[in-house]
Image (cartoon, helix red, strand yellow):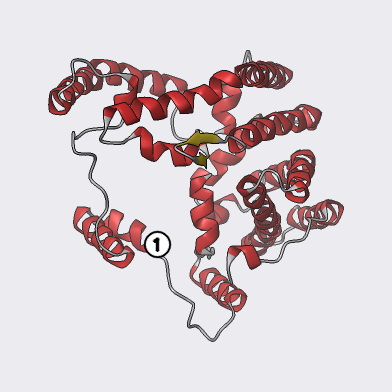
Amino acid sequence: MKFSEMPYSRVDFPAVIAQGKEIIQRASQAKSGEEQFELHQEFNKLMDHVKTLYTIAHIRRDGDVTDEFYDGEKSYYDEKLPELNAVTNEYTKVLFATSYRQYMEEKIGPVAFKSMELEMKSFNESLIPLMQEENALASRYSKLIASAKIMWEGEELNLSLMRKYMRSSDRDTRKKAWDAFSEFFEKNQPEIDEIYDLMVKNRTKQAQMLGFENYIDMGYCRMNRNSYTKEDIQKLRDQIKTVFVPLAAKMHKNRQARLGVEALRYYDMGVYFPQGDPAPTGTPEEILESGRKMYSEMSDETRDFFNMMMIVDMSTSAKPFADCVKELEQIGEEIGVKIKCQREEIFDMMHRI
């Protein structure tokens, strides 16, 4: 089944919220670690259902911002998802306080509980109206960017398709492409500035309502920075400045000489060879196999990680995709891991987003 053929229906949030609260009630009264884990999987499955339908709507809307139906669906989720956050936060509090912490840590890992702590710090129901406004601003910006139409040598291109010409081996072509690319942002600067200003004010207000000085600390929580602190990041910045920047400057000097230009300009960004940067060669299958070989030779960890993300051709399978997903999920439950199956079209589109 192609992505365009995948069925979509609007999430019934009142029903999902009611079902979520019912799971929360049972989770708060779990009689064993095994029951707690089963309820955790049940809650995650409910949320995965919401995420799947939201993702379909999100991709279809971003693929065609003139589609009024999916643009309306995106606005619907912008409003409703913060309300669902209240339920997920309530569940997080119950799970975080479970009497079967040790058992759950063995099942989902101790880092998961660090993430829960950050989630609880960065949410309160009083924020819902501001979170809805924040979502609307983000959607307004993404719609503006996705709507870009740039005339290029008789073709109407979006911003992503312009990047091919911005890395052309011909320097004049690169400059012309960069100027056309930048012109879109110059024309829309007033609206972009307005969105940015409103977003900063919105997020600052959210942070202050939770007792943060500004959005920085709250942002660390929302970005799930569960393994390092602001101080660690500052140390990394200092190391980049003292170690990497001089190396990068030397590399750019070599690149300048290789390109044979008097100075590197903005339109030389991302170009490393005068004849053009190397392009992938071989069939998709050959490229995939080369990647598998490379990661296998690097280390056991990279080999396992690559294998975990392998794409499997199911076009000749007699068994429906949904049945395969269900059976693999059951196998995962039996061996204590979470197996996720995703259609290739969704995987590709999410990475494009």
Residue 346: quarter of image: bottom right
State whether residue 269 appears in this view. Answer: no
Q: Position of residue 62 (x, y in %)?
A: 62, 45
Q: Quadrant of residue 330?
A: bottom right
Q: Residue at x 76, y 33 (%)?
A: 132
The front one of 261 and 38 is: 261
Query: Is residue 217 rendered to the left or right of residue 18?
Result: left
Q: Secondary structure at mark 1?
A: helix
Residue 79 in view of the camera: yes
298 lies left or right of 54:
left
Q: Is residue 28 above or below residue 78?
A: below
- Indicate the amino acid at tag 1: Met
Decide: few, some or many residues near mark 1? Use Cα within 10 Å; few <14, some 14-19, many ≥20.
Answer: few
Q: Between 187 and 329, which is closer to the camera in this rendering?
A: 187
* Residue located farthest toward the bottom when viewing the structure as drawn: 318
Give the labeled residue for mark 1.
308
The location of residue 8, given as percent across then percent down, is 73, 62
What residue lies at 78% left-to-right and 54% top-to-bottom?
Answer: 20
Left of 243 or right of it: where is 233?
A: right
Image position, residue 5 (x, y; %): 65, 67
- Please identify the quarter of the rendering in which residue 138 is found: top right
200 left or right of 308? right
Residue at figure coordinates x 50%, y 83% from the top left:
317
Residue depicted at 86% across the width and 52% down the height: 14
Q: Quadrant of the N terminus?
A: bottom right
**Front-most of residues 92 and 209:** 209
User: Residue 136: horizontal and vertical position, in percent?
Assistant: 73, 32
